[in-house]
């Protein structure tokens, strides 16, 4: 399994490095373009909205494409968009580059997930999806800290150029190593919307929106949080992200195992309860424990966040596959859109709160969204139980 899916995981690593490193390089971008950090944070919102809207539309437009060809095209465009971002002469040009990056990522990731899910036996789907998403968590361990360190020494443009080169390597790997796979039965936009309206699908993707809104309400500003609240230099921000990334890699593996073996709804409730406390702690710590003790507490929160937050994606994807594996290409693309819709909402709300108050206040934003997600999970469980009882 791993040999077949390796290049998909490396592609996820490239996409994750670009998408997640923005938090570490945001202060450098803001400085170069002479804009506030909160305004630079809109780069996350722009990317997320373009991904959320573009991913299902691209899926419809490319429904008849052979899967390997689609993966190669997506990662090729992603490479070119990174080079364009590296050369951006203005903030507006960089924002346009991030739109193109989002569209390419929105074509690649759902296709990679669906490819992985159909390449293994049903009882291995959680682990296959976790393996592909391990590229994202390894991006947290290696790609994001490396990008942050490169930005500190070579400038933020070097980080985009580096991801562009890696994406070209992935393009070659997919072309040489990944077997071609025929396109699944074509589904138009109307059919996709019909699937999205199914209550059981809405319950999953609605939860995804809320959870990711909470996460990106904070993650967008984590570099600025560490630098402004605790005076952490850029190099130590990179080390903090390595710590979070190692925990995220463990959490991703845990999520894949839990998705195949444990009660998924109970495990999700545990994840959300932990995240509510962890995110609230980020805003409370500067007042309760200023100085080194507060910084140590913030780093502990990052570890907990990585461990439990990265256990979430695989569980959600397997929940969607369990509804109807034949709808995988549709439901996984909808979930990908939900991820980035949530990211856009969280980044926008976080930017507003950071601008109106302080960067330290974004922890309350994350905690509020995760509390709403926990309530939503309980409500959807109750409705499902009522529907089952009525049908019985």
Image: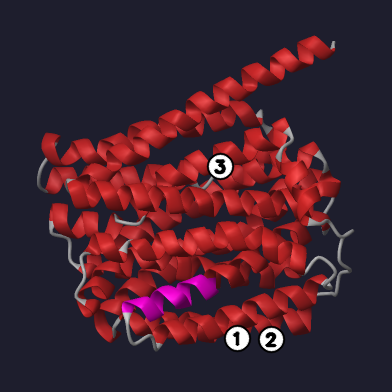
Secondary-structure class at tag 2: helix
Which of label 3 and label 1 is nearer to you? 3
Q: Nearest the camera: 271 or 200?
A: 200
Secondary-structure class at tag 1: helix
Q: Nearest the camera: 294 or 185?
A: 185
Dot 3 or dot 1: first in sequence order is 1
Quarter of the rendering containing residue 12: bottom right
The part of the chain drawn in magenta is 91-101
Residue at the spot x=23%, y=63% of the render? 37
How far apart marks 3 and 1 lie (CA) works out to: 31 Å
**Residue 75 as seen in the image, left or right of residue 155:** right
**Residue 50 as seen in the image, left or right of residue 21:** right
Q: Is residue 98 magenta?
A: yes
Inspect this view and state whether residue 277 appears: yes
Q: Residue extending furthest front? A: 190
Alpha-carbon neighbours of circle 3 within 10 Å: few (<14), some, or many (≥20)? many
Inspect this view and state whether residue 275 appears: no
Q: Are marks 2 and 1 in contact (CB under 8 Å)?
A: yes
Q: Which mark is residue 168?
A: 1
Q: Which mark is residue 208?
A: 3
- The x, y position of residue 119, in whole percent, is 82, 59
Location of mark 2 (residue) = 172
- The x, y position of residue 186, in whole percent, is 86, 60
Q: Residue extending furthest left? A: 291
Q: Is residue 128 magenta?
A: no
Q: Which mark is residue 337?
A: none
- The x, y position of residue 324, in whole percent, is 82, 41
């Amino acid at each position: 399994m791993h040999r077949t899916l390796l290049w998909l995981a490396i592609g996820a690593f490239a996409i994750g490095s670009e998408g997640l490193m923005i938090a570490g390089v945001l202060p450098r971008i803001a400085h170069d373009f002479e804009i506030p950090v909160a305004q630079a944070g809109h780069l996350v919102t722009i990317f997320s909205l373009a991904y959320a809207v573009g991913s299902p539309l691209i899926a419809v437009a490319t429904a008849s494409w052979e899967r390997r060809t689609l993966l190669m095209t997506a990662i090729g465009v992603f490479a070119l968009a990174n080079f364009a971002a590296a050369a951006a002469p203005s903030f507006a040009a960089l924002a346009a580059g991030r739109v193109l990056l989002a569209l390419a990522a929105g074509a690649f990731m759902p296709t990679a997930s669906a490819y992985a899910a159909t390449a293994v036996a049903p009882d291995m789907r959680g682990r296959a999806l976790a393996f592909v998403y391990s590229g994202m968590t390894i991006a947290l361990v290696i790609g994001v800290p490396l990008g942050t360190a490169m930005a500190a020494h070579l400038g933020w443009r070097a980080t985009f150029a580096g991801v562009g080169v890696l994406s070209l390597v992935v393009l070659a790997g997919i072309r040489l190593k990944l077997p071609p796979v025929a396109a699944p039965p074509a589904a138009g936009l109307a059919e996709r919307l019909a699937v999205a309206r199914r209550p059981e699908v809405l319950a999953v993707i609605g939860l995804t929106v809320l959870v990711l809104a909470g996460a990106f309400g904070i993650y967008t500003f984590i570099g600025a949080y560490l630098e402004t609240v605790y005076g952490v230099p850029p190099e130590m921000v990179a080390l903090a992200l390595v710590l979070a990334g190692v925990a995220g890699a463990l959490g991703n593996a845990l999520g894949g195992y839990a998705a195949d073996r444990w009660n998924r709804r109970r495990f999700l409730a545990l994840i959300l309860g932990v995240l509510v406390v962890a995110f609230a702690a980020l805003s409370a710590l500067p007042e309760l424990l200023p100085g080194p003790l507060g910084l140590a507490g913030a780093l502990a929160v990052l570890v907990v966040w990585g461990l439990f937050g990265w256990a979430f994606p695989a569980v959600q994807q397997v929940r969607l596959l369990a509804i109807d594996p034949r709808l995988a290409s549709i439901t996984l693309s909808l979930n990908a859109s939900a991820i980035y819709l949530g990211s856009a909402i969280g980044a926008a709300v976080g930017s507003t709160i950071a601008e109106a108050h302080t960067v330290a206040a974004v922890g309350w934003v994350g905690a509020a969204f995760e509390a709403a997600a926990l309530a939503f999970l309980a409500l959807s469980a109750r409705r499902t139980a009522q529907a089952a009882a009525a049908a019985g």
